[in-house]
Amino acid sequence: MKYIVCLKQVPETDKVKINPQTGTLIREGVKSIINPYDLYALEAALRMKDAYGGEIVVVSMGPPQAEEALREAIAYGADEAILLSDRAFAGADTLATSYTLAQAIKKIGDYDIVFCGKQAIDGDTAQVGPELAFRLGIPYATYVYKLEIRDGVLFVERNLDDGTQVLKLSLPALVTIVKEVGEIRVPSIRGKMRAKKAQISVWGGAEIEADPSKLGLNGSPTRVAEIFSPPPRGEKIILTGKPEECVKQLCEKLKEVIL
Amino acid sequence: MELILNKDKCNGCGECVKVCPFGAIELENGLPQTNENCRLCGVCVKKCPQGALKLPEGTPERKIEDARDVWVFAEQKGGKFAEVVYELLGKGRGLANTLNQKLVAVAIGSELEEEAHNLIAYGADIVYLFEHPDLKDFNEKKYGQVLIDFIKQNRPNIFLAGATSRGRSLIPQVAAALETGLTADCTGLEVDAETGLLLQTRPAYGGNIMATITCASTRPQMATVRPHIFPRTEPIAGHEGKIVKLEPNLDGLDDVMEVISFAQTEIEGPDLTDAEIVIGVGRGIKGPQNLPLVEKLAKLLGARVGGTRAVVDAGWLPARCQIGQTGLTISPKLYIACGISGAIQHIVGIQSAKRIVAINKDPEAPIFEIADCGIVGDLFEVIPVLIEEIKHKRGEENV
Ligand SMILES: Cc1cc2nc3c(=O)[nH]c(=O)nc-3n(C[C@H](O)[C@H](O)[C@H](O)COP(=O)(O)OP(=O)(O)OC[C@H]3O[C@@H](n4cnc5c(N)ncnc54)[C@H](O)[C@@H]3O)c2cc1C
Ligand SMILES: Nc1ncnc2c1ncn2[C@@H]1O[C@H](COP(=O)(O)O)[C@@H](O)[C@H]1O
């Protein structure tokens, strides 16, 4: 079995703000972390490996420092890591990102399951997984929290807004993973050692035989026309008196909604 | 330019009339004749059993300007259209009017025809229906194939879907197939007066930032739209439209992806993401033994209960009830945060709620920064009083 985990390094989003003078993003001093959902995806892959054997390849598209995130993934138990890094990849939206990842995964080849997080917490789009599956021509299931292989077929359970579905997918397939899978395990000492020494391949556009017009900003049909801070919420009141008094005022304010 | 008919091959079977998505072919003297609705989409060419139809040579490259109409994906659950569909029809009607284009709804499922009339009442000019027993359950692979085939033939200008679990899962593959842009989870949609482009506004970086996205050079301009942001409008009196039933092509999908079962959430009423009022509980609730108090309030308000990660990690609520960065994003009319500190990872999931009420005994709790109305107090004292007051007030109203 070969499992591929797509993992993204993201800024700790709560620290990202807009500079009111320049209207640009303030990124300085913001720490980078592995997208939390991608750690659930990695944990899901590790459990499949525990159950059925095989190897795990982690793939990340990002700047050179994303190598850190890949080493961390090896510490957790991934076998191999590939960094997709090239100036030409910069400015990619989900369409271009899914193209780049798909080219890399086709080159890796021979895979059985591709794991993505439910979404990346910087853009919160949740689009790369399904777009990638389409480009690879394989079935996919989103919001997955349980996986099992029986007779060479993948069975998954996944969340929808109003309930849960059990699905059967032919392999290879792609899944996007939610929190219910469980927190990432603690890295072993051996894993940490391996992570330090591991050789991480870096692939650019040439290595993945990409069509330059489909990469990065060139391959991205969407453009950010404007960014701005969210408008402030309206007037507010804070009530501190006796519960009876506070509640009376609250109910008055919320009359139309709660009565 | 017109469709080319080989009269020697045509036997007048009328298959092309049946398969044409636009009602653009009629039989005249036993031979197909196209009218002005023909878009040279080529469906009839593919479907003609005799191979008697051909597209004209050099069918022009499709241009951006040729893309027309505002389309809405009419998501259904158990044969009923999702609430957000009606919100999108209201918004879509406005966009279509501004652009002087049609509003089109496309629905996929089984036995939807009766419901489909509602879509017209709420503003759709055309409803395309794909019905098949195999399409009863939501299945990305099957729904995807149907949608992709159909949109490729039709080139809408704008395509909108609800940012529900189903919408957000289904639509990205369509964008990939069409090599076009897709903006996720929008909270604002406008047409730019100068360029006619769709301005798609959405929160990013956990809502710390708003971004307006455009898609200038590919079509359709696609977006998923957060539920509850746009109001559900009233039906339009006397609005007329037509329902076009189409045959889905599900070839080649056997055994690729099957729905084995679906278990509806046991609790009655709307889902957490669809509820008008949501009560959130945090670690301040102290333990699962105190949930009944909150549930009593929820029952009274017709609300649903969700919680913070701390509460889910403690096992007091199931993971699917977690609200925030690694859980659900909700936008109810009212959110009541009980015993929640207001960590940023929680806030990002609730900040598009119309109103936020917070009950917390710590006056310094960050939740008060975003609350419209805060009560500094012990939730175990405040909630019972609140329940009594609501009952009391309702009693008064009834007199
Ligand atoms: C990567 C990452 C992702 C995360 N994702 C999420 C997420 O999706 N959702 C989420 O919620 N969190 C998330 N968190 C966790 C988040 O940072 C907070 O830890 C969590 O939201 C705190 O939950 P809480 O408010 O219930 O608990 P606490 O922070 O412990 O707050 C409890 C509050 O209850 C008040 N209180 C106590 N007793 C009473 C009483 N009797 N009456 C009234 N008030 C009382 C206290 O004053 C306090 O303010 C995430 C964290 C990380 C690092
Ligand atoms: N640059 C990237 N490199 C590797 N994986 C990515 C990248 N961007 C997105 N992904 C994967 O796609 C998922 C969804 O991302 P998004 O569509 O950006 O919300 C993430 O959880 C990752 O698994």
Image (tube, rainbow, N blue to C red):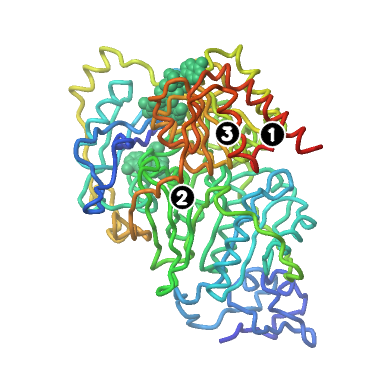
Residue positioned 49% across, 38% down in the render? B372
Relative vertical location of residue B353 with respect to residue A22 in this rendering, above or below = above
Residues at discs 2 and 1 both on one chain = yes
Q: Where is ligand 2, by quadrant?
A: top left
Q: How crowded is mark 2: few (under 14 residues within 10 Å), some or many (20 or more)?
A: many
Say what amino acid the circle numbered 2 marks: Ala
Front one among B382 and A101: B382
Q: Which of marks 2 and 1 is in front?
A: 1
Question: Percent from the top left, x then y, of residue B25?
Answer: 71, 79
Relative vertical location of residue B372 with respect to residue A137 in this rendering, above or below = above
Q: Residues within 10 Å of mark 1 (few under 14, many from 20)?
A: some
- Chain name for mark 1: B
Relative vertical location of residue B365 with respect to residue B171 in this rendering, above or below = above
Q: Which of marks 3 and 1 is in front?
A: 3
Q: Does the residue labelled 1 lie within 8 Å of ligand 1?
A: no
- Chain name for mark 3: A
Quadrant position of residue A114: top left
Residue at which label 2 appears: B184
Q: How far apart are marks 2 and 1 (CA)?
A: 29 Å
- Give the quarter of the figure containing the C terminus of chain A: top right
Say what amino acid the circle numbered 3 marks: Leu
Front one among B257 and B397: B397
Q: Is mark 3 within 8 Å of ligand 1?
A: no
Q: Can the viewer see residue A39 in this picture?
A: no
Residue at which label 3 appears: A250
Residue positioned 62% across, 73% down in the render? B45
Residue positioned 56% across, 17% down in the render? B316
Question: Percent from the top left, x then y, of residue B327?
Answer: 49, 32
Residue at which label 1 appears: B302
- Disc ID at residue B151: none
Question: Percent from the top left, x then y, of residue B50?
Answer: 69, 74
